[in-house]
Image: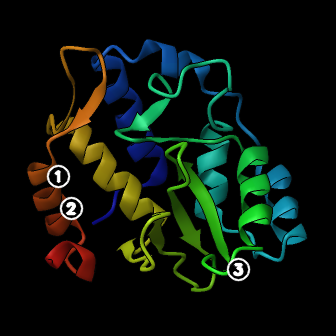
């Protein structure tokens, strides 16, 4: 069973704190309300999503006065603020590789994103990779993704290397993700 978004975000915060990621925790911006998120999503043609709004009700992404390495919420990806996510959405909607309805929630700073796919009622999470044509569903929903990330922190799958970078044990993470997301084909490969 998937943990609530609030429980998962609390576990992620605790995991970041235990790994000494205080600069990131201090750089998380003040939360937005559902009343701020929903109309902005509607303005770009997306139905309000309770789970996406809950993410921004936790924090409005990461302030921009922190290095990309220090801003990683999980290995390789940071949490852009809502305005940056909206801007990315509008820009990428013009690309033939992007599908309208893919809202970018997490970014790597080089053109890859985890997107909430608003084209499905379940709002699955896809991974958009700039160098690949395929954009597979990796999680059935944002709550499933956050629950998996929280478990990775709890199980020590995310760690800080000797140079101070947030890293991942990829084999252990793949096993964890397959166990927690058994209906997602991506984790069965």
> Does the CB distance between marks 2 and 1 fall below 8 Å?
yes
Kindly state the secondary structure of the residue where label 2 is placed. Answer: helix
Q: Indicate which disc, 3 or 1, sits on the residue closer to the N terminus.
A: 3
Kindly state the secondary structure of the residue where label 3 is placed. Answer: loop
Using the numbered discs, state the Cα–Cα distance from disc 2 to disc 1 in whole angstroms: 6 Å
> Residue at 50% across / 56% down in the picture?
112
Q: Disc 1 marks which residue?
A: 173
> Residue at 67% across / 81% down in the picture?
96
Tell me if 132 is positioned left or right of 93 in this view.
left
Using the numbered discs, state the Cα–Cα distance from disc 3 to disc 1 in whole angstroms: 30 Å
Tell me where residue 24 appears, x and y as whole percent.
50, 21
Residue 27 higher or lower than 124, as above or below: above
Taking depth in this image into account, of 80 and 131 the one nearest to the observer is 131
Using the numbered discs, state the Cα–Cα distance from disc 2 to disc 3 in whole angstroms: 27 Å
Residue 153 higher or lower than 18, as above or below: below
Taking depth in this image into account, of 165 and 28 the one nearest to the observer is 165
> Residue at 24% across / 82% down in the picture?
185
* Label 3 packing within 10 angstroms: few (<14), some (14-19), many (20+): some
Tell me if 26 is positioned left or right of 181 in this view.
right
Residue lying furthest bottom in this view? Answer: 120
Tell me where residue 88 appears, x and y as whole percent.
72, 56
| Image quarter (top left, top right, bottom left or bottom right) of the C terminus | bottom left
Q: Indicate which disc, 2 or 3, sits on the residue closer to the N terminus.
A: 3
Taking depth in this image into account, of 114 and 152 the one nearest to the observer is 114
Q: Disc 3 marks which residue?
A: 100
Q: Quadrant of residue 32?
A: top right
> Which dot, 2 or 3, sits closer to the camera?
3
Tell me where residue 11 appears, x and y as whole percent.
35, 36
Q: Disc 2 marks which residue?
A: 177
| Image quarter (top left, top right, bottom left or bottom right) of the N terminus | bottom left
Q: Is residue 161 visible?
A: yes
């Amino acid at each position: 069973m998937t943990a609530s978004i609030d429980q998962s975000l609390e576990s992620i915060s605790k995991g970041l704190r235990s790994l000494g990621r205080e600069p990131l925790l201090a750089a998380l911006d003040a939360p937005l309300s559902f009343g701020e998120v929903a109309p902005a999503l509607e303005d770009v043609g997306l139905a309000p999503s309770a789970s996406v709004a809950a993410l921004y009700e936790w924090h409005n992404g990461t302030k921009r006065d922190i290095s990309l390495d220090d801003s990683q919420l999980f290995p390789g990806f940071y949490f852009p603020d809502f305005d940056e996510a909206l801007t990315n959405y509008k820009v990428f909607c013009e690309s033939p590789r992007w599908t309208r309805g893919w809202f970018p929630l997490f970014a790597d700073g080089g053109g890859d994103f985890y997107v909430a796919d608003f084209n499905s009622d379940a709002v699955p999470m896809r991974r958009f990779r700039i160098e690949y044509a395929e954009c597979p569903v990796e999680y059935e929903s944002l709550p499933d993704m956050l629950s998996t990330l929280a478990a990775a922190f709890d199980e020590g799958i995310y760690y800080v290397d000797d140079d101070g970078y947030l890293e991942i044990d990829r084999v252990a993470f793949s096993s964890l993700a397959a166990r927690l997301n058994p209906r997602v084909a991506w984790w069965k490969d």
